[in-house]
Structures are given as structure tokens and as C-alpha cells.
Amino acid sequence: MGMYDTDAKTVIDNAAQELKKLIKQPEWTPFVKTGTHKERPPADKDWFYTRAASILRTIALKGPIGTAKLRAKYGGRKNRGVKPEKFYKGSGNIIRKALQELDKAGLTVKAEKGVHKGRIITAKGQSLLAKAGYTQSAKKAD
């Protein structure tokens, strides 16, 4: 039971609730879009915690992973009017700030594995995700 036994959405939602206690969202979050491919900012006022939880889960699954790969993960197609749609990367600033907050909370750490550089998850981060997956699994069992 844990992160791997539960679907991603419930793990991310539960981890986002835990992250509200550990990290601080920047004051500019209500005003920014999450990438150039988006037309509006997110409707949820706590979207930063959800993004940080999603980044934490991605680091746990694919780490070491850096900002460039995460930008590609959170990118999307841009509607360019009459011209064909094109893929644009997600906002690097949001990802960097989330990674910095996760580092400050002790959930991730910079590392190198062979040729791969980026963030890997710490034991504290792993236990947070396991607890986030376990809470939902325990509720289903009842």
C-alpha cells in the first residue's frame, strides 16, 4: 500500500494537502499562467501545492530529473489561431520555485547518477508520498 498502489490523482491531492503545511506558495501565484500555451491562470487558488506535489511524485518515479524535462512534461499545445497548433514548454520559473521549496523542506536533493543530473527524492519525501497513497488506500479498505 502506498504511492504505487493508488492512482496518481489521489496521491497528488493528498500530498498537496500535506505540502500546505511544509512549503510556502509565492505571492505571485494568483496572477500567472502555467505556460505560454495557456490562455488563463489556473482557477484553483492552491494550484501551486498541487503542482509541487505532482513534481515530487515525478521525481520519485523518474529521478534524477531536472527543470528541462519537467518543462516538457508540463507543456502543451498552443492555439495559434489560423496557424497550426504547436507544442510549447511549461513555465520554468514555476518549476524552479517549486523545486527550491521542496529542497528547503528537505523532500528533494540535487544529485548526479552517471550522466543524469537533477533532483532525487529523499527519505522524508518518499515517506510523505507513501503516506499520501496510504491514506486513500486505507479509506477504500474501510
Image: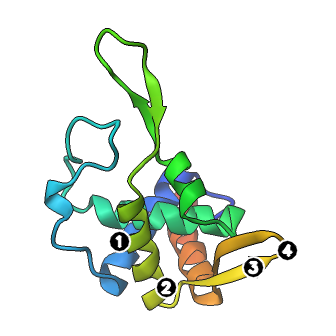
Residue drawn at (21%, 54%) of the image: 32
Q: Which secondary structure, mark 2?
A: helix
Gap between marks 1 and 2, in whole Å?
A: 18 Å
Is 32 situated left or right of 132 in this image? left
Is 101 situated left or right of 42 in this image? right
Gap between marks 3 and 4, in whole Å?
A: 6 Å
Look at the numbered discs 3 and 4 and tell me whether their residues touch, using CB distance below 8 Å. Answer: yes
Residue 54 place in picture, x, y as percent: 49, 60
Q: Which secondary structure, mark 1?
A: helix
Gap between marks 1 and 3, in whole Å?
A: 30 Å
Crowdedness near tag 4: few (<14), some (14–19) or many (≥20) residues, C-alpha within 10 Å: few
Q: Say which label, 4 or 2, has the lower sequence index.
A: 2
The residue most toward the top is 82
Specify the quadrant that holds the N terminus.
bottom right
The residue most toward the front is 83
Residue type at the position of mark 2: Asp
Q: Quadrant of residue 53?
A: bottom left
Residue drawn at (60%, 61%) of the image: 58
Is 119 situated left or right of 116 in this image? left
Residue type at the position of mark 1: Gln
Task: Point out which mark residue 17 bears.
Answer: 1
Is residue 138 visible to the viewer in this orientation of the structure? no
Gap between marks 2 and 3, in whole Å?
A: 15 Å
Task: Point out which mark residue 114 bears.
Answer: 4
Is residue 10 visible to the viewer in this orientation of the structure? yes
Q: In which quarter of the image is residue 110?
A: bottom right
Task: Point out which mark residue 112 bears.
Answer: 3
Can you tell which of label 2 and label 3 is closer to the viewer? 3
